[in-house]
Amino acid sequence: MQFNSFRVDDKTYLQYGSGNWALPPHRRLQLPAIVVEIAGRRQFRGYELGGGQKVFQDVFFHILTEDHWAKKQLIDIISYQNDKQIHLFNKNTLNFPLNEDGTLKANAKTYPDWVSPVSASGHFWKQAILEDMSLVNTSYQPSLHTATIRTTVEVILGEI
């Protein structure tokens, strides 16, 4: 974990290969961070006669921050998503919209284009509903504030 990673007055900030920056980027966790964990619990219920199921998947959001204020803000932002619908997209029909350097490709479609059911993009897939959002735990250790939020995500799979 990288603490104070946005402090440009840190002596190691511009030094390549030293201190916090000696780790490869894929090994660093800059704070604040939200780690999403798919829990091992999944339930199925029938959806309609002739096929289809409702899938209920538990998901944990682990919040890691350097201060109490940021932790409270992230808890509020995530927990207020209770009973919200998220539009999903079919990743198999998409071209990746970013260049190698992380910039957006010319004429690339983005999330709003992918998920609009009224557009002719053909990428809209299903909707997921976040249900039963609850704060599981919260803790404090020196310089590290943590919290965990649990939710159940419901997706209707009509073609099963």
Image: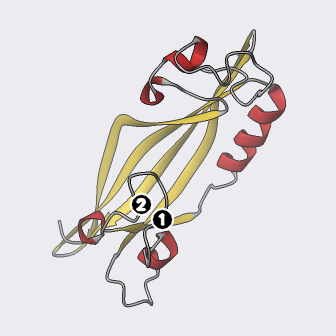
Residue depicted at x 60% and y 29%? 30
Examine the rendered structure and indicate whether residue 8 appears above or below residue 106: above
Which quadrant is home to the C terminus? bottom left
Residue 126 placement (x, y as % from top left): 37, 71
Residue indicated by mark 1: 104
Nearest to N terminus: mark 1 or mark 2: 2
Question: Is 14 on the left or on the right of 100, as rendered?
Answer: right
Question: Is 17 on the left or on the right of 105, as rendered?
Answer: right
Which quadrant is home to the N terminus? top right
Residue depicted at x 48% and y 48%? 152
Amino acid, disc 2? Leu
Residue depicted at x 40% and y 65%? 97
Examine the rendered structure and indicate whether residue 1 appears above or below residue 85: above
Location of residue 157 (image quadrant): bottom left
Which mark, residue 54?
Answer: none
Residue depicted at x 59% and y 11%? 19
Question: Is 32 on the left or on the right of 85, as rendered?
Answer: right
Q: Nearer the viewer, residue 12 or 4?
A: 12
Q: Nearer the viewer, residue 74 or 93?
A: 93
Location of residue 42 (image quadrant): top left
Callouts 1 and 2 close, C-beta under 8 Å = yes
Residue 125 placement (x, y as % from top left): 34, 72
Residue 139 placement (x, y as % from top left): 70, 18
Considering the numbered disc 1 on the image, is that residue within a helix, a strand or a loop?
Answer: loop
Examine the rendered structure and indicate whether residue 80 appears above or below residue 96: above
Residue indicated by mark 2: 98
Q: How is the image coloured?
A: secondary structure
Location of residue 92 (image quadrant): bottom left
Callout 1 crowding tier (Cα within 10 Å): few <14, some 14–19, many ≥20? some
Return the residue found at the far top: 142
Residue 150 placement (x, y as % from top left): 55, 38
Question: Is 99 on the left or on the right of 21, as rendered?
Answer: left
